[in-house]
Image: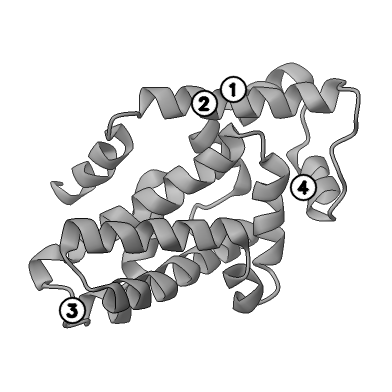
Amino acid sequence: MLREIFELIQRNATDTVINNSAVPDEQNDAVVAEATNTIAAGLRNIVAGGGLQNFLSLFAEGKEERSSLVSNPIVNMMIGHFAGKLMGKFNMSGGQANQVANSLIPDALMSLINKTNDGSGGFSLEGLLNSITGGQVSHQQNTDGLNLQDIVNQFGAGEQVPAGGGGLMDILSKFAEGAQQQQQQNGGGGLMDLIEGFLKK
């Protein structure tokens, strides 16, 4: 699903990156790749940290409006990270970097959320979570009869994880472990290497 996210961000980057004089043409793809890395790694880090509820809430918020997405602290962290990369790797000024980051990251996330919720263009919550957790959704569906929509309905409504563990806590723990393993496997720039591989084909 990483390629689909890259292509989605590329489609959202026409005004903020491709037609932006602050971004040299030869850096367009590299900037889109960095935005893809920011969003994919950011979502994975949420789940790896045990924040599946925050992940699902992010997708629920996206159904409302862009302003609620922009006010989300997770999204703000992604914007700040991406702006820092734009300044450090692409020598943009602080103002230019913040302008690009504040436009591209929320717009791309909104498109990702909408397409995932609609199930259009090959996007799905299961597919996204599988890519983040190394296939834990499919594994849990096969072994435990997991109904992901039940979890979405419960956590998307703002309910808290029940105290005391149990089956649901075990499933959430497996998601976190899967995401942590993906972090380790793709550590040291591995995720960015995968994304940059799309540019060479």
Which residue corresponds to mark 2? 180
Which residue corresponds to mark 1? 177
Q: How far is mark 1 from mark 4, CA to CA? A: 19 Å
Is there a contact, CB below 8 Å, between mark 2 and mark 3? no
Q: How far is mark 1 from mark 3, CA to CA? A: 40 Å
Question: Which quadrant of the view contains residue 168?
Answer: top right
At 36% from the left and 53% from the top, the residue drawn is 36
Q: What's under tag 3, amino acid-wise?
A: Ala
Q: What's under tag 1, amino acid-wise?
A: Glu
Q: Which of marks 2 and 3 is nearer the N terminus?
A: 3
Q: Earlier in the sequence, mark 1 or mark 4?
A: 4
At 38% from the left and 69% from the top, the residue drawn is 101
Q: How far is mark 1 from mark 2, CA to CA? A: 5 Å
Is there a contact, CB below 8 Å, between mark 4 and mark 2? no
Which residue corresponds to mark 4? 152
Q: How far is mark 4 from mark 2, CA to CA? A: 21 Å
Q: Which of marks 4 and 2 is nearer the N terminus?
A: 4
Is there a contact, CB below 8 Å, between mark 1 and mark 2? yes
Q: In this rendering, which labeled residue sits more in front, label 4 or label 2?
A: 2
